[in-house]
Amino acid sequence: RNALELERVNVFYENVQALSNIYLKVKENDFLGIIGPNGGGKSTLLKTILGLLKPSSGKIRVFDQPINKEKGVIGYVPQFTKFNKNFPINVKDVVLMGLMKNYYKMFTRVKASEEKRAEAIMKKLDIFQLRDRQIGQLSGGQLQRVLIARALAIRPKILLLDEPTANLDSNAKSKIYNLLKYLNKNMTIIMVTHDMSIISSYVKSIACLNTELFYHGEPKLTKHILR
Ligand code: ADP
Ligand code: ADP
């Protein structure tokens, strides 16, 4: 079964074409690494899969359904952003955000069972003790784990990550990749990365945007999108 299918997808920002004629098939429980040069359209691809950007043409299917019928199926860990030190939201509310009914009415209550589950995820990611901290006061590794916890709280079947370990030291990195490897047992993972060592040791298949693929060796790295 395919978790995700893109067919002839084109995406524009006004006059700039960021994605051109993209075909991609991702099998359920794949761990796909997306590589490509800066400006190659990697972030645009993730945002399009999420439904944040609308293709001008082409088809996207998530578990054989058109994308907008599948809200809550896809979790997203955005590219690293630094928060202002006094940004007025704490770790726990960031993690619960995706479970709040009305996204714009922050701090609406979530179900007790969902809150319990979110707490378990925070414990697993070793951030439960930080739950009352302001989001702007975390280290890079802590913040990245909070954003992963927020994505996991909705119990996604597909997890998208945009360079999840940029800015992290190698110890924090390997912790995150070991977690992803564990989650990949019953979750499809699609990750943008520049890190070739990660690609060779964790990723099951690879897609390359907007460039030739010169990577040799691993027979398990099978997928290419070239244009
Ligand atoms: P990558 O993630 O591979 O670095 P992006 O998806 O961010 O690439 O960008 C793909 C292309 O789209 C680039 O040419 C970039 O300049 C352009 N682009 C990205 N975001 C915007 C935007 N908000 N408005 C206009 N052009 C954009
Ligand atoms: P890590 O090994 O997880 O990357 P760091 O060594 O960067 O952690 O940070 C150590 C401690 O300092 C953490 O508990 C973190 O919360 C705290 N810390 C880091 N940056 C800030 C900051 N800007 N304001 C307050 N506390 C901070």
Image (cartoon, rainbow, N blue to C red):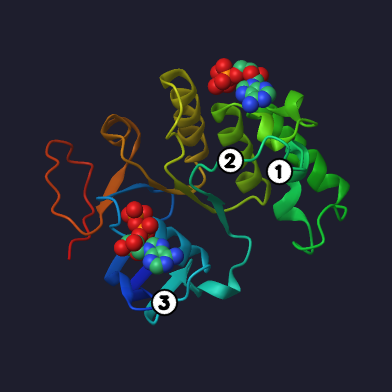
Q: Residue at x 51, y 63 (%)?
A: 50
Which element type, helix, strand or loop, lies under badge 2? helix
Q: CA distance from mark 3 to mark 1?
A: 29 Å
Considering depth in this image, is 1 or 220 the residue closer to the camera?
220
Considering depth in this image, is 13 or 75 the residue closer to the camera?
13
Q: Image quadrant of residue 199?
A: top left
Q: Is residue 19 left or right of residue 92?
A: left
Rate crowding at label 3 as few (under 14), some (14 to 19) or many (20 or more) other CA atoms within 10 Å: many
Picture coordinates of residue 224, whole percent (x, y): 21, 56
Rate crowding at label 1 as few (under 14), some (14 to 19) or many (20 or more) other CA atoms within 10 Å: many
Residue kind at label 2, given as amino acid type: Ile
Residue kind at label 1, given as amino acid type: Val
Residue kind at label 3, given as amino acid type: Pro
Q: Could you tell me which quadrant the N terminus lies in? A: bottom left
For ligand 2, the image quadrant comes to top right
Q: Which residue is mark 3?
A: 55
Which element type, helix, strand or loop, lies under badge 3? loop
Rate crowding at label 2 as few (under 14), some (14 to 19) or many (20 or more) other CA atoms within 10 Å: many
Picture coordinates of residue 66, whole percent (x, y): 50, 76
Q: Which residue is mark 1?
A: 95
Note whether residue 196 is visible: yes
Which element type, helix, strand or loop, lies under badge 1? helix
Label for residue 148? 2
Picture coordinates of residue 209, whole percent (x, y): 25, 57
Q: Residue at x 79, y 62 (%)?
A: 101
Q: In the figure, 14 relative to 205: above or below?
A: below
Query: Label 2 near label 1: C-beta < 8 Å?
Result: no
Q: CA distance from mark 1 to mark 2?
A: 9 Å
